[in-house]
Image (cartoon, rainbow, N blue to C red):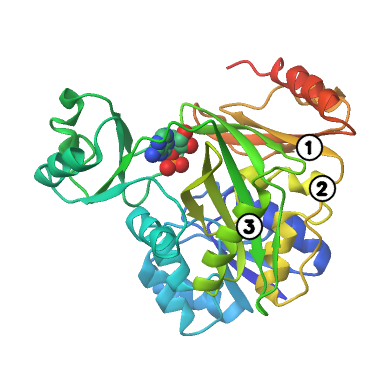
Amino acid sequence: MKIGVIGGGQLGRMLALAGTPLGMNFAFLDPAPDACAAALGEHLRADYGDQDHLRQLADEVDLVTFEFESVPAETVAFLSQFVPVYPSAEALRIARDRLFEKSMFRDLGIPTPAFADVLSQADLDAAVARIGLPAVLKTRTLGYDGKGQKVLRQLEDVTGAFAELGSVPLLLEGFVPFTGEVSLVTVRGRDGEVACYPLVHNTHESGILRLSVASSNHPLQALAEDYARRVLEQLDYVGVLAFEFFEVEGGLKANEIAPRVHNSGHWTIEGAECSQFENHLRAVAGLPLGSTAKVGESAMVNFIGSVPPVAAVTALEDCHLHHYGKAFKAGRKVGHATLRSADAATLQTRIAALEALIQD
Ligand code: AMP
């Protein structure tokens, strides 16, 4: 089976690493000459709106999937005429727009921060009057790794903030005084079968994920899965869908969903019986899902800007390096490592040993 992937970054690369043993081949559509997934499949180097290349991709593959959510809606609509596309155009439409996803959470009874649609500075002033400060102002689309957002703490921060974020459609959210950030990576098959990985605790630095630790018997696991199932059913979703939640006193507030494999699920490559990458491929290909159970304790440390010396990382016990083969650049995700151990205390020691190797 040949899988077409829109985007050829590290997520595409890890999909191919998981799918190759299943007998799958891959073609990646990505305009970047140095797309790092190209090492593992055919690279169609073209813009996402290039209909000639989209048609070529559709002709060559059995189905198409995505490794990022900002794919233009027209691209998805065009491809869907010729080849099955998972997840669906409708799921992508909702997930890439913060207003649509938060409205969906609200309609499904899933707690989410107070929010307001902002199309002008006047809208922003009215939204601040309603929601109060502090609040977080975000672009509705194309935001990632904390880009395209600003925390508004006092009234002076509100003045001119609409223009500061580019005078594009925005969303104002009430600031959530969370006690932690957790994510739930879920997968739904073509036949409606659902599986969920254990909740993961995430730590960010400058808006970028730095550390994910998989939990054991998290008290909010069942609640998170209940919320997730509502969304998966609503969207008739196929593939991996990741949920980011704020942990608050006694519960969860949904922040966002990502309609793809997710950075906070990378630990599953070595830390779960079947990885998020393999499960995404199983789901879109109509195969039975694999077990999402953990094997021991696991954490993932992201390498941002540069990868520490390979010899030093690989010298650590039960430490699994993933070097994406990308040029090093400040703020760029260029690799990660999964750490495993039999118990939580040893895992913390291993995380500290790995973090000591990180220069930046
Ligand atoms: P996002 O791009 O929505 O995932 O936001 C990036 C990070 O900003 C989150 O992981 C949180 O640490 C923080 N953040 C986003 N929205 C809020 C909010 N409404 N209240 C508090 N912190 C937030």
Residue 265 versus residue 53 in the image, above or below? above
Residue at (61% x, 76% y) in the render: 63
Across and down, in percent, residue 39 comes to 68, 52
Q: Secondary structure at mark 1?
A: strand
Q: Amino acid at mark 2?
A: Lys
Between 197 and 335, the residue placed more toward the observer is 197
Q: Quadrant of the N terminus?
A: bottom right
Q: Report if the CB atoms under discs 2 and 1 are less than 8 Å apart.
A: yes
Find residue 294 and name its label.
Answer: 2
**Does residue 315 appear to the left or right of 113 in the view shown?**
right
Q: Amino acid at mark 1?
A: Ser
Question: Circle 1 is placed at which residue position?
Answer: 298
Across and down, in percent, residue 290 comes to 80, 64
Does residue 197 appear in the picture of this structure? Answer: yes
When asked about the image quadrant of residue 44, the answer is: bottom right
Question: Circle 3 is placed at which residue position?
Answer: 225
Indicate if the residue with disc 3 has its beta carbon within 8 Å of ligand 1: no
